[in-house]
Structure formats: C-alpha cells, structure tokens
Image (cartoon, rainbow, N blue to C red):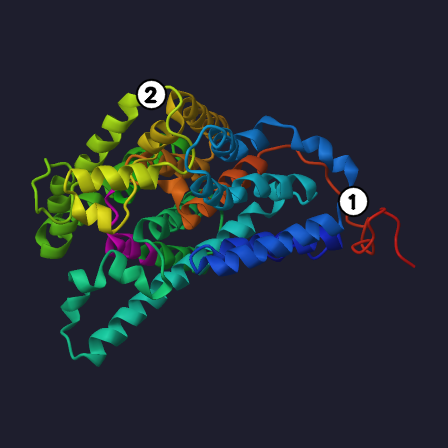
Amino acid sequence: MKELLPGSDSLSNRISFYHILLLMVSLPFDRFYSHIILVSFCVHTIIQFKKDNVRSIFTTSVLAVQAVFFISAIATIYTAYRQQAFDEWGRNVVMLLLPLLFCLNTIDLKKYRPILLLVFAFISTATVLYLYANALITIKHYGLPFRSIFTYAFTNHNFSEPIDMHATYLSMQLVIALVYLLYLLMTDKITVAFKILCGLCSLVLLAGMVQLGSKSILAILFIMINLVLPYYLLTGRKRVWFMLITISISAVLIGFIFNSHTFRERYITELQTDLSTFHPGQNPDPRLARWQLAVQLIKAKPVLGYGSGSEPTLLGESYFNHKLYSSYINRLNAHNQYLSFLLKTGVWGLAIYLLVLQYGFKIAIREKDVIFISFMLMIAIVSLSENVLDVDKGVFFYGFFFTFFLFSHSQRKVVNNNELRGDYLCLTGQPIT
C-alpha cells in the first residue's frame, strides 16, 4: 500500500495527487468544500503550468467531458432566458475545467488510481456509518423503537439529510465505492484481514444504498453484481457459483423489501405512482405527468429546442396551467436528462449527449474496466429519472469521475521522480535559487 503513495514523485505531482484525493473525499459533502478544493487545484495548475502540456488538451477524451458545457454555451445564442442560461454555465463550468486540470498536470493517474479509489471507498463507508449513527442517536433521543430506522422518517432523503445530499446522488457515489471493493475482493491477492475489512465495508455500503431507497440505483447494482462483475472478472465454475450466490442474496434482499412496509412503499408503490396517469389534486405529481408536459413542449421546437435555461420557466408555466401544483411550487425539472436536452437544445443537443455516452461505454468496455462501466451505466440509467446535469452534485460527480476514468486509461508522459523537485514556484521551468 505504501508504494502506491506519491512520496517519491515530483513535488508538483504530489500536490496534484492530494488535490485529486481531496476532491474525491469532498464529494459526499457540501458543495462548498468541492468548490474550494477545485479553486485551489486551478491555482496549483496555473503555478506549475508548462506549455508542452497544452498539446494534450486537444483530444477526444477532453472534448467528450466538455461537450455538455459547449452544448449549453451554443444553445445560449438563441435562448430567451439569458440569465438562467448563464446560471447553467456556472454549474457546468466544472465539466470545462476538470479535463483541462487533469491534462495540464503530469500526474500518472493510472498509477495512483487504486489508492485514490480505495480512500474514496473508505470515506464513503464512513459517511454511511455516520448517517446510521445519526439516525440511531435520534431514535434514542426520542425514545423510539429500534425498528423505526426502517420507517419513512429514516429512509431516502431523510437518511441523507444530515449531510444535505440528495439520496440518489449519494447512492451513485456509494455504487462506485462498492463496485471497487468487490473488484478488490474478486481479483487482488490481498491479506485475509484486508479481505474482511473490504467485506465489512461492502456490507455497510449495500445497507446504505437500501436505506437511501433509490430505485434506479438498486437496479444498476443488480446488473453490476449479478452480470457485469462475474462476466468480466470470473470464468468457468467460479463465474457460475458467484452468480448463484449473488442472485440468491438479491432474492433475499427483494424479499426483505417486499416484507417491509416502508421499502415496499418506496420501491413498488411509488414506482407505480410515478408511472401513473395524473389526477387533479394528486400529491405528489407523477413523473409521467411531467414527462408528458415536457414532450408537449418539445413537439413545438424539436430541432433546436428553446435554448439554455429555458426548462424551469417553461415547465413551471405548464405545470401551473395543467394543475400540477406540487411540481409548480417545488419548481421541479422534467426529471429526465434526455427530455431536458430535447427541451433546451432539441435533437442536436441530445444527439451529442448520446454520442458522449457511447464514447464512454466504448472506452469502458474496451478496457474491461468494471468500475468505469458501473459509472457509465449509472449516468445512462439515472438520466431516465433525474436531471443529473442540472444540479451541482450531479455535475461534479459526472465531470470528476468521467474525467478520472478516461484519463486513467490514457497514455501520459511519465515524469522522472528526480525532476522538478524544487521548481514548484517556478513558472519558467528553471529552479528558483
């Protein structure tokens, strides 16, 4: 483990390493921390900038991550909602900056990827344990029975509320952590003690995801554990036995969900409600009703859309006119990233987004990178039920991990460990004396 740390690397690379590590650690928490670390990373990159690294900016991988930002920028040209469009720029600028920062720093991501993902997995586990501890302290304080932890008061958004995180976006981060730990258990020659630690952390993460109650995430997890992991990491009898065990565990988990009133309500009843026809006075409004109103707006301008920043205002007016008052009061978006692109940018914007997803899947499958595959599956599937790229945490998750996985497979210049050890404050490349 010690050899994975950047102790013998150049000073600039060590500082880059700890910036990336802190960005990963900050993801489950308030966006303030992520933004402060990102600003610091920008300053560090400017200080140690070298013009030879500029050529690495002009690659397909960089453009793929930045594509969503450029879609918003282009659609600003014809929008009638200029201020809202610039607000959208402010959220999406993370996707413009992160690939540039990874390009202009010479750190070898492939080398440090294992330790970075391991720390992220442990931090994610600690976050879930903190949320459970907070829930148990609350239960004890109010003298509630222990089984109250499985009630609505302590599931979904109520479970993640202490760290002010949307349940789905926190669940997405936990999937990355869990898949990596399972990858270690299935492939690495690690000590028994470390296997036990990874196994316990995996159980905590799995429990946290069930508690958070994200329907789309649980579906992704089922696909990853029962199909993707055994297909890519195991062969022969090992694959068959693993699938039999995981499918059995999945069946037990599904049985638990059906036998728990709270989780049955969350996973089954609410799904039926989301896909049902809207009736006046119904609360909450079904997702299907919002999708239908978005489609009506899209039909009027299918090619170009209404421009960046148009979605909240247009949908808000449509919600009010069709008596979806809950959606109107809460200023809800379409809760579908594909419809969101069609509404704001028309067919051309959605086509580019689909090409970006196709590119990500192509690299992930080519490299047989199960963690990258899990990320791409999450973005593609969660985009069906959420506007992933319209909230800060979703944008940061997408921008950071998409860049991280793409660049951990790209060929980077290897920096001599004995070089640049004293040039951190030198912009010319010559040591300061």
Q: Which residue is mark 1?
A: 416
Magenta segment range?
204-215
Q: Amino acid at mark 2?
A: Pro
Task: Give residue 241's position: percent from left, percent from top.
Answer: 28, 38
* Mark number, residue 257: none
Q: Relative to 78, does residue 35 appear above or below in the rendering?
A: below
Front one among 22 and 2 = 22
* Main SS class of the magenta portion in the image: helix
Front one among 151 and 354 = 354
Task: Give residue 203's position: percent from left, percent from top.
Answer: 31, 56
Q: Which residue is at the far front?
A: 80
Q: Is residue 212 magenta?
A: yes
- The Cα–Cα distance between marks 1 and 2, rounded to whole angstroms, is 53 Å
**Badge 1: how crowded within 10 Å, few (<14), some, or many (20+)?**
few
Front one among 390 and 117 = 390
Residue occupying image coordinates x 38% and y 49%? 178
Q: Relative to 306, does residue 222 appear above or below in the rendering?
A: below
Task: Give residue 373's position: percent from left, percent from top.
Answer: 42, 34
Residue at disc 1, secondary structure: loop
Q: Is residue 65 left or right of residue 278?
A: right
Quadrant location, the N terminus: bottom right
Quadrant location, the C terminus: bottom right
Q: Is residue 117 left or right of residue 378?
A: right
Looking at the image, can residue 259 be seen?
Answer: yes
Task: Give residue 424's position: percent from left, percent from top.
Answer: 78, 55
Quadrant of the rendered structure where residue 152 is?
Answer: bottom left
Q: Is residue 116 magenta?
A: no
Residue at disc 2, secondary structure: loop
Residue occupying image coordinates x 18% and y 49%? 326
Q: Which residue is mark 2?
A: 302
